[in-house]
Amino acid sequence: MEVLKNKKTLQDFIERQKEMGKRIGFAPTMGALHNGHLSLYEAASKENDLVISSIFVNPTQFNNAEDLEKYPRDINRDILILKNSGFVDAVYIPEVADIYPEKAESSHYDFDGLENEMEGKSRPGHFDGVGTVVEELFRQVQPDNAYFGEKDFQQLAIIKKMVEKKKIPVKITGVPIFRAENGLALSSRNQRLHEERREASKIIYETLEKVNKWFNEFSVTEIKERIQDIFDQQKGMQLEYFLIANEETLQETDFFYKDKNYRAFIVVVVDGVRLIDNMHLD
Ligand code: PAF
């Protein structure tokens, strides 16, 4: 596996691969790799000649300095995971100046309103930061296909929208949420939780499963009341939001219409760690 530590080495590498007509699959990450990332690489390896990942903790998508500072970083461990995975041919680990040559600042994006829902309300400027870094990485890596986890469902929708609006020639694929045995969605942030809190956090997934059952029985208001009751009884957990949204527009719904697809979205803060999850409702 090639370890490409700056833009110049990446460019030389990409040029060689393009000359050979290789089809490139790309999965950008912020490191602290886990099995969820491996599922992106596995999907990419099935559909491409070559898989590239990137590791870059993007400062512009953090709206909280403490969250940026506490974001887990262990580059040597990550490189080892990538090598051992057998799915990845090259990893790009840029310096901040490779992505932001002048100032680490976001561009402003219009994602047709997707950016104003859920995480957009809770984390102002977050999606401008994500759009900026992903657009730049796409420009540098020039992938044919790119892979993103459905855990960050809103991010996935926003990247699809960006590619469509800016006519960037890359196909975006969403990869289903990878869960621990107890159901907790894998996330780099889980590393910040003690073992027993990770175990207790399975309630987030269990709750979403309940919502999927209640979906045909109860109104949105009743479901929301039940969810609030569940989390009111959990020590050290705060329900930041729970809502059910139209899967395409990501707008919150108060009623269910037969011909629309819905997804439940939840954010719970466990011992100061913000955990997000979602589930398609059948
Ligand atoms: O999902 C992530 O890890 C990040 O938001 C991404 C897409 C790598 C952009 O920094």
Image (cartoon, rainbow, N blue to C red):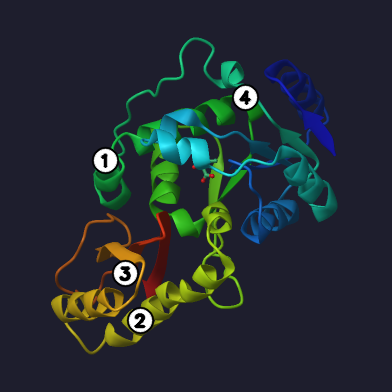
* Label 3 near ligand 1 (CB < 8 Å): no
Instruction: Name above or below for residue 18 compared with residue 190.
Output: above
Gap between marks 3 and 1 measured at Cα? 19 Å
**Which residue is identified by label 4?**
140
> Few, some or many C-alpha atoms within 10 Å of disc 1 (few <14, some 14-19, many ≥20)?
few
Sooner in the amino-acid sequence: mark 1 or mark 2: 1
Gap between marks 2 and 4 measured at Cα? 41 Å
Q: Which mark is residue 1?
A: none
* Label 4 near ligand 1 (CB < 8 Å): no
Gap between marks 4 and 1 measured at Cα? 25 Å
Instruction: Name above or below for residue 96 compared with residue 87.
Output: above
> Few, some or many C-alpha atoms within 10 Å of disc 4 (few <14, some 14-19, many ≥20)?
some
Disc 1 residue type? Answer: Asp
Sooner in the amino-acid sequence: mark 4 or mark 1: 1
Indicate left or right for 33 with 231 as reference: right
Disc 2 residue type? Answer: Asn
Front in this rendered view, residue 203 or 16: 203
Q: Which mark is residue 261?
A: 3
Disc 4 residue type? Answer: Gln
Q: Residue at x 31, y 69 (%)?
A: 261
